């Protein structure tokens, strides 16, 4: 942590600006556009995932400390498992004539 | 609670009546025998309360052998029933129950504990550790597994066995089509055993990541440790899915929920989906440690370092990844459409690539090696061609379009027996011959072992090879009989005769254990095979603390290097320090019992009784939270005495390497 004290916290500032842009962007799309409900949900959902990524990497010190590498591997593993189980199940259950 | 006592005990079938009498007599015999030999205290303090990873491993293996007997009897009964057309040995219901319990027991209560038992014995020794990361949790894993296994096993005499196949597909497994309590056993017993397995997985991941001895980086770990590590990671990934699926099944069956029943807006196919999301990784949990076992044995008995270590590691990582994305190939015919089936065909066939890499690595390890034909090596050699037959037919089945032809036939049954028996059972036998001296201090008899090997391998091929052709001719699986006109009779008869030879092989194995306990030479060294990894650098059988001084490692095959350079084989008195050990505990056994009792009540849907029994589970958890036992220390003098006993034996380790 020592080396961070004397340096301009560039990643924190960038993270803060990105967070503001993503938050106001989401609010703008939800409140000020005439897109359909479905499209709005997709857009703000995507923005939320991006926001979470920025928070993890720029503010929550994901890669720092002795467990930094482990944390990144765990997050990737968790995301992979979630995608396989949730997205995989929905896809398999809803594709084809099984559901029609 | 409305207990129907006439439905409680299964009556009216002479086979089951015979089993009931046999069970009662066996239990009376065990109690009488232990009392007569005054072994109760020994049994309690040395085994039931133990937290020693080697003893827990041995208990896993004993349970596995017993369950192999049980599952094998199921198999023989099925083969007897189908040996001739229109046999009336078993009725349809009994046949359904038998193939269901055969599948569940062989996978979850035979293969899993055998491999977890071998992992328990070997992994801490291979990484130069004194125990697993959480010794008491390890004991809890075993007793939960054992509680679940016993609960499942009593089903055929009390209340009726599950009868919807080991996959228990809905809607058949639901309350509407299986109103008896048989399938409750499936939901509850597997849940309890599954908790034990999940805890084992966590324990081994932490052990392998945190407890390696000085100098052993990840890429210097022995191959069996690597495969056990990856198998544990897959356990953590896959078992929670099964936990959730079983919980939903329990809600459906016991509390009238509709997760898997169409009537209430549920989706029956979701069960198949969740089951195989766990079930496919499960078969890789089984086969990966087995691959590790073969790697160790082939390397040891070829007198060579394992060929292509890095590609071996890479291929198990790829197998682990692919194992999570192939589950749909178990139900192509469900009709998920061409896109889904095509993608899953491709991922399925892709698994053949890393597996092929491993096969070639084993062959190249043997190339120009000085091969020694021990029993462990014979099993490893037999594995290669048998497993390739299983693997190639797997690629045939993996093609979505072609699978419509093979689906639900005996071709499939032959395929998975050709993968699981060479891939797990051969490996377990090889591992038992190989590590037996490490566990018990004597080797199994090689000559009786040859009988075991040849009878088993010939019997295995004679049993399952005909099933490929029966399947291609259209014989369906899980069918309790067939007509004379079908023309299946000759091949079914060959298969039945094969199963008898297979059983003789298993009995040769049991006889070998009996013979070796009575007559085998106890005067062996710590390293009877001239092996290469750290587990052989200590005594046989291993002392409770494993290593008087933790070894240091700077490459693969550390023990081989120690022997070659003649360093680190002796120990100076000044190097010996007190060793901190965990205390024994009766709590894991208690938890196994209350989980079993609570589960039993839940099976019979006696909810109040189950809730009262569950208080015992909570009490155990609370007791454990306030358990401040810090363990004990083994004094230096005792260690010196133990070490001097085995280190001065004639023909000691460093005399081997020329």
Image (cartoon, coloured by chain):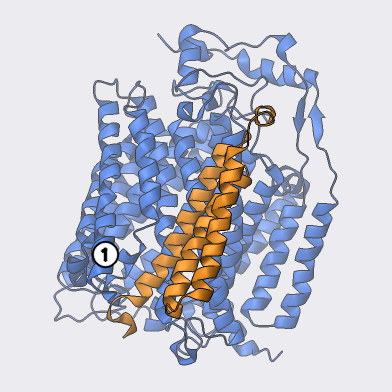
- Chain letter for mark 1: B
Left or right, B608 with respect to B92, comes to: right
Viewer-side residue, B21 vs B352: B352
Query: Does residue B495 appear in this view?
Result: no
In the displayed structure, B263 sits above or below B513; it is below
**Which residue was labeled with disc 1?**
B412
User: In the figure, what tint was chain B given?
Assistant: blue
Query: Does residue B333 appear in this view?
Result: yes
Instruction: Report helix, strand or loop for mark 1.
Output: helix
Viewer-side residue, B123 vs B329: B329
Relative image position of residue B1 (x, y in whole percent): 72, 89
Viewer-side residue, B606 vs B553: B553
In the displayed structure, B62 sits above or below B449; it is below
In the displayed structure, B538 sits above or below A59; it is above
For disc 1, the neighbor class at 10 Å (few under 14, some 14 to 19, many from 20) is many
Relative image position of residue B58 (x, y in whole percent): 58, 43
Q: Quadrant of residue B185?
A: bottom right
Viewer-side residue, B64 vs B33: B64
| Residue under the image location 63 percent in, 81 percent down | B604
Left or right, B172 with respect to B382, comes to: right
> In the orientation shown, which residue stands out farthest toward the front?
A32
Relative image position of residue A57 (x, y in whole percent): 56, 45
Q: Quadrant of residue B372?
A: top left
Where is the C terminus of chain B found, in terms of image quarters? top left
| Residue under the image location 24 percent in, 57 percent down | B346
| Residue under the image location 74 percent in, 47 percent down | B49
| Residue under the image location 75 percent in, 70 percent down | B614
Relative image position of residue B263 (x, y in whole percent): 46, 92
Chain coloured orange in the rendered structure: A
In the displayed structure, A63 sits above or below B487; it is above
């Amino acid at each position: 942590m020592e080396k961070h004290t004397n340096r301009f916290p560039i990643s924190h500032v960038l993270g803060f600006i990105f967070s503001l842009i993503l938050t106001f962007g989401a609010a703008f799309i939800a409140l000020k556009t005439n897109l359909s409900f479905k499209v709005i949900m997709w857009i703000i959902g995507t923005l939320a995932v991006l926001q979470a990524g920025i928070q993890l990497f720029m503010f929550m010190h994901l890669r720092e400390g002795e467990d930094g590498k482990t944390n990144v591997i765990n997050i990737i593993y968790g995301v992979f498992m979630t995608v396989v189980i949730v997205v995989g199940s929905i896809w398999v259950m809803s594709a084809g004539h099984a559901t029609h | 609670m409305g207990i129907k006592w006439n439905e409680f005990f299964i009556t009216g079938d002479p086979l089951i009546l015979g089993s009931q009498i046999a069970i009662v007599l066996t239990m009376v015999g065990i109690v009488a025998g232990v009392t007569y030999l005054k072994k109760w205290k020994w049994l309690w303090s040395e085994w039931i309360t133990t937290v020693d990873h080697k003893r827990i491993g041995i208990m896993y293996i004993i349970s596995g052998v017993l369950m192999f007997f049980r599952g094998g009897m199921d198999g023989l009964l099925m083969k007897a029933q189908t040996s001739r057309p229109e046999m009336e040995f078993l009725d349809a219901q009994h046949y359904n129950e038998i193939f269901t319990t055969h599948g569940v027991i062989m996978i979850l209560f035979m293969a899993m504990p055998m491999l977890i038992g071998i992992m328990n014995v070997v992994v801490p020794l291979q990484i130069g550790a004194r125990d697993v990361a959480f010794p008491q949790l390890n004991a809890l894993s075993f007793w939960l597994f054992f509680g679940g296994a016993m609960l499942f096993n009593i089903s055929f005499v009390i209340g009726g066995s599950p009868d919807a196949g080991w996959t228990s597909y809905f809607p058949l497994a639901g309350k509407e089509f299986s109103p008896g309590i048989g399938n409750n056993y499936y939901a509850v017993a597997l849940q309890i055993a599954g908790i034990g397995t999940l805890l084992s997985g966590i324990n081994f991941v932490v052990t392998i990541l945190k407890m390696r001895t000085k100098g052993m980086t990840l890429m210097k770990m022995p191959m069996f440790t690597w495969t056990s590590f990856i198998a544990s990671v897959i356990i953590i990934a896959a078992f929670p899915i099964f936990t959730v699926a079983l919980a939903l099944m329990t809600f459906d069956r016991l509390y009238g929920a509709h997760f898997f029943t169409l009537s209430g807006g549920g989706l029956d196919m979701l069960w198949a989906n969740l089951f195989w999301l766990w079930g496919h990784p499960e078969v890789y949990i089984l086969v990966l440690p087995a691959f590790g076992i073969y790697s160790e044995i082939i390397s040891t008995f070829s007198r060579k370092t394992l060929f292509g270590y890095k590609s071996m590691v890479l291929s198990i990582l790829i197998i682990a990844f692919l194992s999570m994305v192939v589950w749909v190939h178990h139900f192509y015919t469900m009709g998920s459409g061409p896109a889904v089936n095509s993608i899953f065909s491709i991922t399925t066939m892709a698994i053949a690539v890393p597996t092929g890499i491993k096969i070639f690595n084993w062959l190249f390890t043997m190339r120009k090696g000085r091969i020694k034909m021990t029993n462990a090596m014979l099993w490893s050699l037999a594995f290669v061609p048998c497993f390739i037959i299983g693997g190639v037919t797997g690629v045939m089945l993996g093609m979505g379009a072609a699978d419509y032809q093979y689906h639900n036939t005996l071709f499939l049954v032959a395929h998975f027996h050709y993968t699981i028996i060479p891939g797990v059972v051969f490996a377990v036998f090889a591992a038992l011959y190989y590590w037996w001296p490490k566990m018990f201090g004597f080797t199994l008899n090689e000559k009786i072992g040859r009988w075991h090997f040849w009878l088993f391998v010939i019997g295995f091929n004679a049993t399952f090879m005909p099933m490929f052709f029966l399947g291609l001719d259209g014989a369906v699986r899980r069918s309790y009989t067939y007509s004379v006109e079908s023309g299946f009779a000759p091949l079914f008869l060959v298969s039945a005769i094969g199963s008898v030879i297979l059983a003789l092989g298993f009995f040769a194995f049991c006889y070998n254990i009996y013979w070796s306990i009575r007559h085998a030479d106890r005067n062996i060294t710590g390293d009877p095979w001239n092996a290469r990894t750290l587990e052989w650098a200590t005594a046989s059988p291993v002392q409770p603390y494993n290593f008087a001084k933790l070894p240091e490692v700077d490459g693969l095959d550390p023990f081989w290097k120690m022997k070659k350079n003649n360093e680190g084989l002796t120990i100076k008195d000044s190097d010996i320090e007190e060793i901190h050990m965990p205390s024994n505990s009766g709590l894991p056994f208690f938890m196994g019992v209350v989980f079993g009792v609570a589960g039993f009540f839940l099976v019979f849907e006696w909810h109040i009784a189950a809730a009262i029994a569950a208080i015992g589970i909570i009490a155990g958890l609370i007791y454990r939270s306030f358990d401040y036992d810090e363990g004990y220390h083994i004094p230096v003098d005792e260690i010196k005495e133990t070490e001097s006993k085995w280190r001065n034996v004639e023909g000691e380790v460093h005399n081997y390497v020329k």
